[in-house]
Image (tube, grey):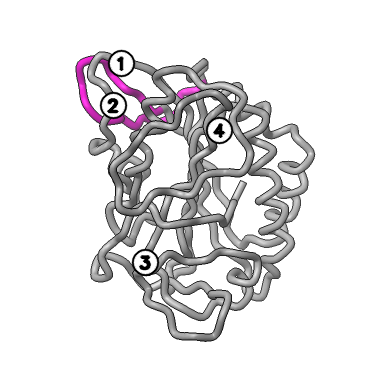
Amino acid sequence: MAIILQSPAQELHEDSFNEATVSTNNDQERDPHEPPTFDSKCLTQPTTTVLYLPPLLSSLPPGVEVPLVSTDNPPLVTETHLPDIDPVSLSLHKALHHFRPLSGGYADLPYAQAFNWLELDLPLDEEREWYAVVFRSKRKPGSDGGPLYEADRKAHEEAVSNGGLIMYWYGVPDPQTGLNLATCIWQSRKHAIGANSRPNHIRAMKLAAISYEIYRLERYRLSKVKGQPGIQVSDFDGTDVGW
């Protein structure tokens, strides 16, 4: 999945990032610190610099109270709601309002070093594991991003409806190398495997195969250890993750 829906969640200082460009809905000069508007056109006709790289959180199940989170730039949430979420994953969902990359070189960094895992604040008495997937990619020159954008958007909403997807984050291509990184966090590996067989996901993957020069998947285990703050990242070892 490579969803390109974004909204302000964490403002990143200009001097800590390489410049990346996306288009806006008008031709006026925009402040790069303002929230970007993402649509299929921005992938094929990029024009302006964007310094926001926010997470896209799955909307909580109906009836689950949305926690109040103190942040100047709240993240975007999906139109589709999760069917369910367990209490510790709800704590992670709340903490991920503050998810952000630590530098503009995230596409080349090891996953554990690319994001602010240790800053994510969950209750000390909670413990759990989650499944994370990373997509490292480089678009083929001249490839049409519009159809892939639409397919990915539908695949993302489909995955949320199917259950288990907590967050999706998508960066912007490095202006020198063209490399990019996207990641998603699941309540369990079983949820991620279930989403792979859904029709919109299959269509998005077929389009990705012809749109990317480089497309590499990595898998990780995220752990919240009881009595310790933050999230620990380790390589996926082939065993079950989450529930």
Mark closer to the chain start, 4 or 2: 2
Amino acid at pointer 4: Leu
Residue 61 visible in this rendered orientation of the protein: yes
Contact (CB < 8 A) between labels 4 and 3? no
What is the distance, in whole Å, between disc 4 and disc 3 at their CAs?
25 Å
Amino acid at pointer 1: Glu
Q: Quadrant of residue 232?
A: top left
On screen, residue 23 above or below 93: below
Secondary structure beneath dot 2 equals loop
Mark closer to the chain start, 3 or 2: 3
Image mark count:
4
Mark closer to the chain start, 4 or 3: 3
Mark closer to the chain start, 1 or 4: 1
What is the distance, in whole Å, between disc 1 and disc 3 at their CAs?
34 Å
Amino acid at pointer 2: Leu
| Circle 3 residue | 51
Contact (CB < 8 A) between labels 1 and 4? no
Secondary structure beneath dot 4 equals strand
| Circle 1 residue | 126
- The crowd level at tag 2 (other Cα within 10 Å; few <14, some 14-19, many 20+) is many
| Circle 2 residue | 122
What is the distance, in whole Å, between disc 3 and disc 2 at their CAs?
27 Å
- The crowd level at tag 4 (other Cα within 10 Å; few <14, some 14-19, many 20+) is many
Q: Quadrant of residue 221?
A: top left
Residue that appears at 50% across and 24% down: 64
Taking depth in this image into account, of 11 and 137 the one nearest to the observer is 11
| Circle 4 residue | 165
Question: Magenta residues, as a range?
Answer: 222-238
Residue that appears at 35% across and 44% down: 99
